[in-house]
Image (cartoon, grey):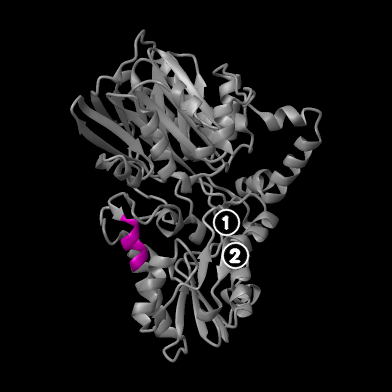
Amino acid sequence: MCGIVGIVGNRPVNQAIYDALTVLQHRGQDAAGMMTDWNGTFCTRKKNGLVSDVFQQQHMDELRGNVGIGHCRYPTAGTLKSSEAQPFYVNSPYGIGLAHNGNLTNSEELKEMLVQQDRRHLNTGSDTEALLNVFAHELQCQGTERVTPEAIFAAVAAVHRRCRGGYAVVALIIGYGIVAFRDPHGLRPLCMGRRETTRGIEHMVASESVAMDALDFKVVRDVLPGEAVIMEIDGTLHSQQCGERRSYTPCIFEYVYFARPDSIIDRISVYKSRLRMGERLADKILRELPDHDIEVVIPIPDSSRTSALEVAHRLGVKYREGFIKNRYIGRTFIMPGQEQRRQSVRRKLNAIDLEFRDKNVLLVDDSIVRGTTSKQIIEMAREAGARRVYFASASPPVRYPNVYGIDMPAASELIAHGRTERQVEQFIGADWLMYQDLDDLIRAVRYDNGEITHFDTSCFSGQYVTGDVSPEYLARLEQERSDRAKSQREGKRRRGPFEILDQVGDDLTPETPDTRARTG
């Protein structure tokens, strides 16, 4: 779960990439990085932290060049170390920097083949480094002295044959330009755009269209599943379908939660999708509880507001903002560790007592994943004086891990896994609980684009489109990437002899007066 951006411009792109990453910050709050090409030299800055923390003025001054890529990260695979911040780099062939959004489901097999057969060295546990080395190896196998579009397309086709899972990739080839491609199922989003300037046309790729809106780029289209796009330094554009397009199944959770509502992904408006989710959720409430006594509908900010507003309109009851969000607290569902998520909820939200006191309240959320937030919010509503607290989810029960780039690796951490809806209702403490039906969710999202006949609904249905996700794989994933596993690794690291060096990471430069002033 990350945000990626690449720009080929006619002027320095550092500020534009910075602005794009800021707009995409919701997709990853753990680390950020940028790489530019300046006269045949890679300029790089990457580190743990928010975009505004990673890039200070001194770093921006050093990130010169008219071509570059950027990344904001939330670590699903790999570790929290700043050494695994992206972009990654290899010097052979040509010099390639790469950033990616998604997860590879066969990363362990790839790493073994890369080391034993391709004779490549891997320095981290990140599947992005594995993906980069597969691309670099296949490009080298083309045997061309100089980079050519034909060689790149052949290399991407080989990547599609070797790599499985969800991935949207942006790569910078020194002295040549940017390559962007998307997995053959289209699981992770990627769009392209252009901007006309007095100096000529500039090209851009990004995870979401909202990044282009912010930079005044016009969205041209989405990168198709299995397609590769090449943007040369001189502005020349190439595109080609690399290998067979296996399906067109974008991840439906992008529309439920991840993406900003002002984005359009695969020609589908996220905002309109969430409106229709609210309509269909309200219709279900009216069908199953025609004599409901709901007096007010209150959303769980922010991503559920759109659905909640339509629920209230459809039910004919008041819509009120009952919780005020502290915008300086990260998204709790993606925080690493159950205890950290639990502590952050009350720092993140504060109830307005007047909107709850002596009322039957319907709380609407986009989804219920681990149940931490839902349970605590219901407690807060009761403490604020609510007579009865009902709860509705704009998406179906999340029962299965999502393995394609969302931090849901462990089924045991999902509140709905192995539980009935009534058991979830009792666990979170609601007077009644209503989930969206999966068919209604699919109809709500695909309304704008009939070309997409299927979505990846694996976290709801347990059906994985890549066909390689077995119970054994899920068990290994839980063992490696659950909250418990992450906590154990972090504990060992802190107890190790190199604790201080590991914490300092790559930021060993003495502080200057300028950086002290900017970091506060």
x, y (%) of residue 432? 55, 81
Q: Nearer the viewer, residue 68 or 64?
A: 64
Q: Residue at x 49, y 55 (%)?
A: 458
Look at the numbered discs 1 and 2 and tell me whether their residues touch, using CB distance below 8 Å.
yes
Asked if residue 274 is among those painted magenta in the image, a careful observer would answer: yes
| Badge number at residue 373 | 2
Query: Is 301 located above or below residue 170 in the figure?
Result: below
The front one of 68 and 253 is 68
Name the spot of residue 46 as percent of width and height, x first. Answer: 53, 29
Which region shows up in magenta? 269-275
277 is higher (above) or lower (below) than 252: below
Assess disc 1: are there few (<14), some (14-19) or many (≥20) residues with their C-alpha within 10 Å of its C-alpha: many
Find residue 414 and report its image quarter.
Answer: bottom right
Classify 10 Å Cα crowding around label 2: few (below 14), some (14-19), many (20 and above).
many
Amino acid type at circle 1 is Phe
Asked which secondary structure carries label 1, the reply is helix
Mark 1 to mark 2 CA distance (whole Å):
8 Å
Upstream in sequence: badge 1 or badge 2 = 1
x%, y% of residue 2?
48, 42
Quadrant of residue 413 within the rendered picture: bottom right
Question: In the displayed structure, would residue 482 be above or below residue 192?
Answer: below
List the residue tagged with mark 1: 333
Residue 417 visible in the shown view: no
Question: Which amino acid is tagged 2?
Answer: Thr
